[in-house]
Image (spheres, coloured by chain):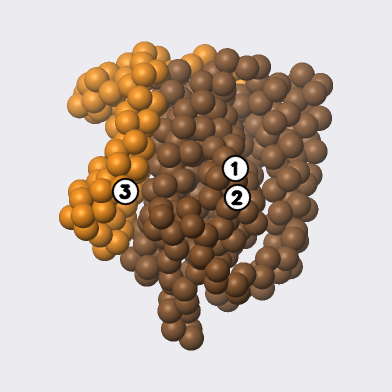
Amino acid sequence: MEEGIGTLLRTGVLLSAAIVFLGGALYLARHGESPTDYRVFRGEPSELRQIRGIVHEAISLRGRGIIQLGLLLLIATPVARVIFSIFGFAAEKDYLYVGFASVVLVILVCGLLGSS
Amino acid sequence: MNVLEFTALVWLGSVIAGFLGSLTGLGGGVVLVPLLTLFFKVDIRYAVGASLVSVIATSSGAAAAYVKEGISNIRIGMFLEIATTLGAVLGAFLAVRISTGTIAIVFGAVLLYSAYVAGQPRTKDPLDDVPDPLATRLRLNGSFPTPEGMRHYCVRRVPAGFSLMFGAGALSGLLGIGSGAVKVLAMDQAMRIPFKVSTTTSNFMIGVTAAASAGVYLSRGYIDPGLSMPVMLGVLTGSFLGSRMLFKAETKSLRLVFSAIILLLGAQMLYKGMAGKI
């Protein structure tokens, strides 16, 4: 199970970093000259706050949308690790830890979905 | 400053933060948020969102290596993640409801505490091997590879460690950091887990903990792609370089320098928070 978790985490991080890098390059090429201002908090526009909107923005090849898709994948990586652990513990017949990992998964899903 | 210059400078700052964070074991998050708010004048909510994302990246990247080497204890991690994720969801819900000044004050206090932890010499690994009944029932005891072969260890005071981890998770969700300093308190001091195992296992847990609060941050619009991009890529680069240097650098003097920096940043965050300037 250790091998699998290690590979899963590494792949998730590298893939998301690559997507963020690509989106960033596109964003800088198009908006590099614009002024920045992060002093005042406005919050992100609604299409960059939800999964559906982000996927739509990324498919339209908007730099910020692609970056956000990469970040979404990054957030999903530890969640995938927990799901993988449930199967790993089940294969080891360690049902106590199948239970613990499932509890963590429920909390994660509540945190991810309950807020939107 | 235009987007290109801003991105380049934030990237450079994040590389340094990630580098120092990985060398000292405190993580890049603790210096990132003060760096962004105090020097780049970024609103603390954007800073916390970007930091949270970078924390997931570095912890998952480092955890991948440690897990394969068999140092992290996956059962301890999985069990304590129940506490940290619950705490993280609570922390994130608090973060979107309290004032930015209060967040800055809490952040300042955590920085001062982290400076104290970083300045302390490492606690000696416990040598006593008397099993604790609860830890045994939860199958938390384990062993890890050392130059002298596998070493067995027993975990203590599970309830105390579990409660402290809930607090660590709440701070992580509130401030967008890995809260390594609190985890050290829980795992090293309370549960008496050997240093190498506790640091790597805590690293393993940080990603899941941060993911629990990331949903709240994303839906509230705290995660800005333009800011998170250089921060995430920079911290990832810096911590990778740091982990390569870990065995060559003189860490004792470095820890002292780093704790002095954190102390200064902490004092400034406290001041700005109290003066209502954040």
Q: Colour of chain A?
A: orange
What is the chain identity of the residue bearing mark 1? B
Q: Quadrant of residue A65?
A: top left
Relative placement, left or right, of B136 versus A82 is right
Q: Quadrant of residue B252?
A: bottom right
Residue found 78% across the figure and 35% down from its top: B268
Q: Mark 3 touching mark 1, by CB under 8 A? A: no
Residue B38 can be seen, yes or no = no
Q: Colour of chain B?
A: brown
Query: Label 2 is placed on what type of residue?
Result: Ala
B129 vs B233, nearest the viewer: B129
Element at label 2: helix
The residue tagged 3 is: A97
Q: Is B87 rendered above or below residue A41? A: below
Query: Label 3 is placed on what type of residue?
Result: Tyr
The residue tagged 2 is: B186
B139 vs A56, nearest the viewer: B139
